[in-house]
């Protein structure tokens, strides 16, 4: 749902809804999934989130692998469906010319994009770890997490496209090709570094430690 709804908004409605609409699409899709499948799987939807949870000590290594594979496959399938839909546009759709909701940087340097993705992912995973810990946000955890993603998108779309999610970047990049694929490394490495740092901070007690409760992550 995150890739399908968020990227569909970029592809079909960005000129109508603007950056705020795009940010809300990504953030609110997380809220919806958090409360619908959160009690089942934690609703990570994001390899970086799963990595942060693993590093914090809340997830086993075999679960991490399964989560990451499922997240990446889901992103690829969602992107494939969007690709089929966009090709049905009257007059055709040139992915090379118009893009495919992929992440990337042009106005800012790769260093700027890397720093934003790493720091933003650190903050995002930090919110998740604390909101879902004992004494955290409780029933409001899903809302807090989704709104954090909205704010991150508003802050960073112009810098890096605002991913903080390797799977979200992987799916569209496979269909966009070209520059999207050559820049994909940044959207894998930077979010993973930020997420791991957040997990280590909690594990070390820097930001407090607590067991995950039954709220979505």
Image (cartoon, rainbow, N blue to C red):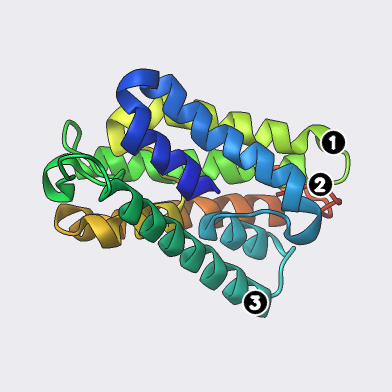
Q: Which residue is mark 1?
A: 139
User: How many C-alpha atoms fall within 10 Å of the one at disc 3: few (<14), some, or many (≥20)?
Assistant: few
Q: Are marks 3 and 2 in contact (CB under 8 Å)?
A: no
Instruction: In this rendered view, identify the residue nearer to me: 171 or 62.
Output: 171
Is disc 1 in contact with disc 2, using a CB cutoff of under 8 Å? yes
User: Residue at position x 65%, y 77% from top?
Assistant: 61
- Contact? badges 3 and 1 (CB < 8 Å): no
Q: Position of residue 183 (x, y in %)?
A: 22, 54
In front here: 130 or 138?
Answer: 138
Q: Which residue is mark 2?
A: 215
Please determine whether, in this image, residue 149 is positioned above or below residue 21: below
Residue position for label 3: 61
Q: CA distance from mark 3 to mark 1?
A: 27 Å
Q: Secondary structure at mark 3?
A: helix
Residue 40 image offset from top left, x and y in percent: 79, 59
Task: State how far apart marks 1 and 2 are (Cα).
Answer: 7 Å
> Going by the image, does 113 lie left or right of 59?
left
């Amino acid at each position: 749902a995150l890739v399908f709804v968020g990227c569909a908004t970029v592809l079909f409605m960005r000129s109508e809804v603007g950056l705020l609409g795009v940010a809300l699409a990504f953030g609110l899709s997380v809220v919806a999934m958090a409360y619908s499948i959160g009690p089942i799987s934690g609703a990570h939807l994001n390899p970086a989130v799963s990595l942060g949870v693993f590093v914090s000590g809340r997830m086993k290594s075999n679960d991490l692998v399964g989560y990451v594979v499922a997240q990446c496959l889901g992103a690829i399938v969602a992107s494939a469906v969007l690709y089929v839909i966009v090709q049905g546009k009257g007059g055709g759709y040139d992915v090379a010319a118009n893009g495919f909701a992929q992440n990337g940087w042009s106005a800012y340097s790769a260093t700027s994009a890397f720093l934003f993705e790493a720091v933003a992912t650190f903050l995002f995973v930090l919110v998740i770890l604390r909101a879902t810990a004992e004494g955290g946000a409780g029933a409001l955890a899903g809302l807090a997490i989704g709104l954090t993603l909205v704010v991150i998108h508003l802050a960073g779309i112009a810098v890096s496209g605002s991913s903080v999610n390797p799977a979200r970047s992987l799916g569209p990049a496979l269909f966009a090709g070209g520059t999207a694929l050559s820049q994909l490394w940044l959207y894998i490495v930077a979010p993973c570094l930020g997420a791991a740092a957040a997990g280590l901070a909690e594990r070390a007690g820097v930001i407090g430690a607590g067991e995950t409760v039954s709220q979505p992550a």
